Image: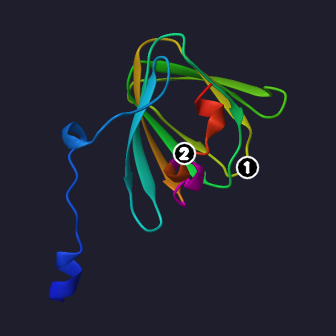
Amino acid sequence: MNESKIAKVKLNRWNDLKAEPLKEGLTRKLVTGERMMIAHVYLKKGVDVPRHAHENEQLTYILDGALRFWFGANDDQELIVGAGEVIVIPPNLPHRALALEDTLDVDVFSPPRQDWLSGTDSYLRR
């Protein structure tokens, strides 16, 4: 096995990562690779994620709690996603969400969200 490949593997522990506060009741922790990003997103009950869209394909896995999602420019589809459930959000699909309970969700993006890395994700910060 190639030793240089092993040396590039980085171990991350969620408990050791600093939470980034975004707005009241919404924080996240990020781990980013070259072509993927995973995030723990912590939402207090009642927190809304405004409608937005992005080029990144997204997996959302709810570990605890529940989110109500609306998809499409006119909220064409509504879905409640609870603990143990995973949704796949295609690239460029407008969506928004509301925390129905205190929620921990795991979001996976490919490619990584550059707006999250640069802090230009203003829709999450108001």
Residue at position x 47%, y 19% from top?
66
Identity, as a three-letter code, of the amino acid under mark 2: Gly
Q: Report the front residue among 84 and 125.
A: 125
Tag of residue 92: 1
> Where does the image place residue 28, in percent across and percent down from the top left?
41, 35
Residue at position x 51%, y 45% from top?
59
Identity, as a three-letter code, of the amino acid under mark 1: Asn
Which is more N-terminal, label 2 or label 1?
A: 1
Looking at the picture, does residue 106 appear above or below residue 77? below
Residue at position x 53%, y 21% from top?
67
Q: Secondary structure at mark 1?
A: loop
On-image quarter of the N terminus: bottom left
The residue at which mark 2 appears reads as 119
- Coloration of the structure image: rainbow
Residue at position x 66%, y 33% from top?
123
> Where does the image place residue 18, in percent across and percent down from the top left?
29, 39
User: For residue 2, which quarter of the picture?
Assistant: bottom left
Which residues lie in the magenta part?
A: 111-116
Q: Report the front residue among 122 and 33.
A: 122
Looking at the picture, does residue 57 appear above or below residue 62? below
